Structures are given as structure tokens and as C-alpha cells.
Image (tube, rainbow, N blue to C red):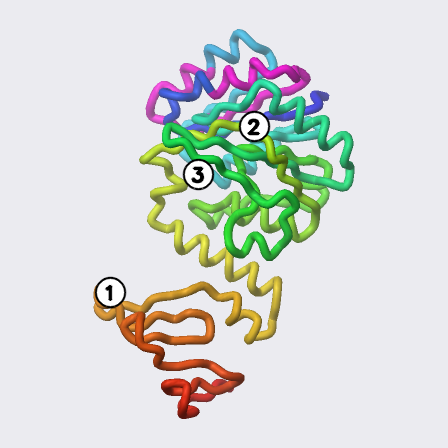
Amino acid sequence: MPRVSVLMPAYNSEKYIATAIESILNQTFSDFEFIIINDGSTDNTAKIVRQYARRDPRIKFVDNKKNRGISETRNSLLDMATGEYAAYQDSDDVSMPNRLAQQVKFLDSNPEISVVGAAMQAFPIARLIKCPTQPRILDFYFANAVSNPTAMMRMRDIKSAGLRYDTDLSTAEDYDFWFNVIKRFNIYNLPDVLVNYRVLPASLSHNNPKLDECNAKIRGKILNFLASDEAIRTNLAPTRRLYLFGVLPIFKLKRTRIYLFEIIPLFKRRGRWWWLFDVFPFITQR
């Protein structure tokens, strides 16, 4: 049994997957299996992975002839993992040579932690991406508090809780997964940059038209978990804008206030009442 299972989902990654694979094969920590699933790519991704698999027996390659989607692919990777720990490696990112060694050392020394992430350096436009060191559930309401490409998890905990990726989500599946983890286990994010994160204009996670819808669905789950009290839920709710004919901004809703044309304070909520111009009790909630 290897100490670590490195999990890579791949789809149409022929330009970058060789660099991503080599960043794992060149790790200072070598006791790992490397599971790669090609999810129905239409380019040369499968051919490139096969070449590496012939040269290194640690690579286990699965070639899906049809695209099954990222959630099903991630679930298959979890099912195949046999290591004590599992780490993600995306097919267009680059792990630092000491990444696995540093994260294994941390989990070995901190048995109360189930998942360890790290900072990322985005490129080609340089940007440092950091998550809260010790995220709590509320942190997840505002954003995913684990950088998925950096995550290493204790597989005993993940499997004992039966955690899976939601196949109804076409994107933001990692956001939902890590929220389900933080409800049960402790997460820690190292301050060190352990992954170079490639930002691509055509990235599915950035351009999926359902991204906002999926994020809203997950935030709804978090609100339901955090509080059933409507006042608390309202205070946590983000700013929303309402457009006439989908074009003209008529109202802006910001927690307990509603602005006309996004400027004029129209209604303010106090208790169960919405006050007109903050003077007349106008509408009541029951």
C-alpha cells in the first residue's frame, strides 16, 4: 500500500499534462501511486499519459471513452485510491518538488487534521492565492476555503464519512465537497506555496454558465446548516440586484435595506416590518 494516492482528472489537456505529470514524478517524496483518469478527451491527452504509464509503474491509467463529467471522475478517483493519504494534481498545474513531502509530514504530525491545503501561485498572470489557515464553516459561505489543487486528505476519514462529489453539480463540485468535509473534520491550510496554478481563459470552472447557480445552491446549503433563524440568514445574505427587463437596475437588496436605482434608500427592515423611507411601517413579514 502506498502512503499517498495522487489523483488526476484530465480532459483535453495535451498542452500541459506532461508538465503536470512530471511535477509529481519529480517529487522528493516517492512512496505514491499516481492515478490518472482521462475523461473522454478528444485530443492527444490519452496518448501522452500512456507514454508515461509505460515508463513508470506507479502510474495507473484509466481511459474513459465517453466524457462522464468532473464529479463522476473525481468519485472514481476516490474509489481507486489505496493510499493512506490522497492528493489532487490537476492536469494543467505544477506541484512544487517538496509538496508531497511537506503535506505528508504535516498530516503525520497532526492526527486531528483530516485535510491539509496550501497557498497557490497563479500564472501566467501572477497572483498569490491563500485560504484561511484554519477555516471554519462560516468561511465557506463567502468562498471555498480550500484550494482544491493543493489538497491532501486523510482517506480513512473521507471514506468513513462516505463523502462523495455531487454529480448534479456541473461545476463548483469541489466547493460543495469541502463544505461537507468541514462539517465533520478539521482542515488546515499551510501558508507555503506548494502549487503553481495555471489560469486558462477556457477553464470550465471559470466559464461554466451554471457557475453562479451552483455557487448559490451551495451557499443555500451552508445557510441552512448555519442557522434556521431568518434574521441571521438575512444578515448573512449577499447583496443582490434586480433588473427591469434584465437590463435596467431598479432595486439593490443589501441585507436589511432596499435601494431604488441602487442609490435611494427605499425600504429598511426592522424586526418583522419593512419601513418606507425609514419612516413609515409599510410591509410586515409573517
The residue at 51%/71% (across/down) is 234
Of the numbered discs 3 and 2, the one sitting upstream in the chain is 3
For the residue labelled by badge 3, is the local secondary structure a helix, a strand or a loop? Answer: loop
User: Which residue is painted at 76% across and 30% down in the image?
Assistant: 108
Q: Nearer the viewer, residue 218 or 101?
A: 101
Picture coordinates of residue 274, whole percent (x, y): 44, 85
Question: What kind of residue is marked 3?
Answer: Gly
Quick one: label 2, few (<14), some, or many (20+) residues within 10 Å? many
Q: Is residue 45 magenta?
A: yes
**How many dots with numbers?**
3
Residue at which label 3 appears: 69
Between the C-alphas of marks 1 and 3, the distance is: 31 Å
Residue 44, placed above or below residue 267: above
Helix, strand or loop at disc 1?
A: loop
* Mark closest to the chain's N terminus, 1 or 3: 3
Q: In the rendered structure, are the residues bearing label 1 and label 2 in contact, judged by CB atoms less than 8 Å apart?
A: no
Residue bearing mark 1: 246
User: Over which residues does the magenta segment extend?
Assistant: 20-49
Alpha-carbon span between mark 1 and mark 2: 43 Å
Identify the amino acid type marked 2: Leu
Between 157 and 200, the one lying in front of the other is: 200
For image coordinates 33% across by 49% down, the residue present is 209
In the rendered image, residue 89, in percent from the top left (x then y), is placed at 53, 28
C-alpha span from label 3 to label 2:
27 Å
Q: Is 58 placed left or right of 274 in the picture?
A: right
Residue position marked by numbered label 2 in the rendering:
194
